[in-house]
Image (cartoon, helix red, strand yellow):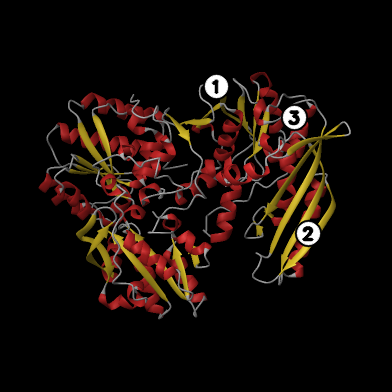
Amino acid sequence: MHQLISKVLRPALSDPSLDRLHDGAELSAGGARLAFTTDSFVVQPRFFPGGDIGRLAVFGTVNDLAMCGARPCWLSAGLILEEGLSMEELWRIVHSMEQAASEASVSFVTGDTKVVDRGKGDGIFINTAGIGLIEHDQRIEPSSIGDGDVCIVSGDIGRHGIAIMNARASLELESQIESDLASLAAPVLDLLKADVKIHCMRDLTRGGLGSALIELAEAAGVHIHIRESALPVREDVRAACEILGLDPVYVANEGCFVLFAPPQDVDRALEILGAWPATGGPVVLGEVDLRTSGVVTIESRLGIDRRLDMLSGDQLPRIC
Amino acid sequence: MKFVDEYREAGPSREYARRIAQICTRPWTIMEVCGGQTHSIIRFGIDQLLPSSVTLLHGPGCPVCVTPLELVEKAIEIASRPEVVFCSFGDMLRVPGRRRDLLAVKAQGGDVRMVYSPLDALKIARANPTREVVFFAVGFETTAPANALAVYQAAQEGIRNFSILVSHVRVPPALEAILSEPENRVQGFLAAGHVCTVMGYREYEPIAARWKVPIVVTGFEPMDILQGLYLCISDLEGGRHTVQNQYSRAVREEGNRVAQELIGDVFQIVPRKWRGIGEIAQSGLGLREEYSLFDAELRFGVTDRTVEEPAECRSGLVLRGVIRPPDCASFGTDCTPEHPLGATMVSSEGACAAYYRYRAGASEHEGSKA
């Protein structure tokens, strides 16, 4: 995916906003600073522990806007329905979208629906786009990450990916692992209201923490150093990862983000994030320096540094 | 997490590393057999804690890596048939055949499914009686009992639309093959803990005695590996060649008898080709005559296919411990996880993948021993 974007999409569609490699574009219109983003959702199964495709389609876009430091305001919804999808299921999904929008204080202001022949879609595909307002003077983007910045993760990682994998394959894990799917808008707005200096944020969706950090290190031209012993991974998620041979660092999340802040703002950031249930348990993962450019290293529990590398394709469970 | 965290603690691990340094009076070359151990070593940086006189060679114990190209091609041929649901562990899907892998078959319309157990494939067969469900039965002695159980159950229930494509391999003949190579450098082995949970470790005793190499049954966590190395090097320094069990929390001398009986009921010992190494006598398991109905090679008429291994992939030398991944000219250039020449670059347990993933482009990290 990373290569697809850098080798095919960026060269073809280059624009100064796109080239900033952020979760959304920052635009100005009539004196207002706007954030604009879009995302498409194709999850299977459509209903999973902790959420469904409708809720995901709302919070996914809301979170991308929040990562730009914007207050999410307006969303569009594009639904592609496969012939044969039951009305009951569609109703549940749409109801879930409505409820999520209300929780995140955003409105659906435009939309479109298409039906494709049976076999030409996977039940339902949803695209949402969103516009948010940037109501502060900070520049929250990869290029603002600087020497000495502290890297904070908002909560425990890996729950969404394992919940989906479990729902798909009925792994019969002892404990029910729910997706961490949540709106990140409120905690981010709280940080901004308290004037915490935020240099950059990124939600840890597909590819997880590892991919997000590598993308940011490359975009910012910095070295990010984190500690394995600091990684917050819930016990049951870690056990599932051990069994399947997966590295939680690369497992997807839907309610978790990393934040880069100068050292003097770290304590306040931790306190504010810790007060929200969705981001309970924020921890300091590591620091930024300029030793090398575009590299993330992780210190193993034995105190040895190794480089984190971008995964090629999805992680596949091992044989034994 | 219990049974994991206590074996990853830095203090005791460093203490073992210190004790290894204390007892080492000469250079020693030790092979860890299992790919899971290789990944632990590279991921946690265990090799960098060792004195420079200890060289670790990475062994052939990655089932995905040693599955011969021929069998991958057979899998691709069977998976491409319209009536087939081809089920496989995730690891095997990205292993390159001559022109494509199983994921490409899926992208081109084949019904290729990732499952977590052969019993899941059997479930799919029960639920889809009009389809031919094939399971890619790959692995060492560790996965053999579950595969044997799936075939046994299919036979008991009279499920006719289920078969397995067998590529089972056995560890002991592979160790003998490595030791009998003229260019062999291995002086001691860390045997694969999980294989020994099934098979026990009596079958290693004749190997240790005949070739005068110590063999230590070893687990997969940093402390396991360092303790295994300590035991192995103690033997080497003392001129002994015993079989020891470091992984006693999981492995008994006699292994798991029930699992062994199940394997013996369904499978028999056969010669088997290893990718990059060639055929090794008695190194595989194949279905017994009475279960040949469940043999996918016979069912789909692909027994006679033969494929030569490509010359440019030197994974055979890596698997035999003759070279290490970074010694290969193609490593990280012509051969990457995106465009692998061989399976060692693909599998989550492959040595080349471990080096690429954890030491990628970081030659400055290489060789900085503590």
Q: Residues within 10 Å of mark 2 (few under 14, many from 20)?
A: some
Q: Check disc 3 and report the residue beneath it.
A: A191
Residue B129 at x, y = what percent? 49, 79
Residue B299 at x, y = what percent? 36, 77
Q: Is residue A244 above or below residue B55?
A: below
Q: Residues within 10 Å of mark 1 (few under 14, many from 20)?
A: some
Determine the CA span between mark 2 and mark 3: 31 Å
**Secondary structure of residue under mark 3:** helix
The disc at residue A290 is 1
Q: Is residue B5 above or below residue B155?
A: above
Name the amino acid type tagged 2.
Val
- Seen in the image, is B119 located left or right of residue B66? right
Using the rendered image, report if marks 2 and 3 lie on a common chain.
yes
Q: Check disc 2 and report the residue beneath it.
A: A94
Name the amino acid type tagged 3.
Leu
Chain of residue at mark 1: A
In depth, the one of A158 and B15 nearer the eye is A158
For the view shown, which residue lies furthest in the top direction? A264
Chain of residue at mark 2: A
Q: Quadrant of residue A133?
A: top right
For the view shown, which residue lies furthest in the right direction? A30
Using the rendered image, report if marks 2 and 1 lie on a common chain.
yes
Determine the CA span between mark 1 and mark 3: 26 Å
**Residue B220 in view in this figure:** no
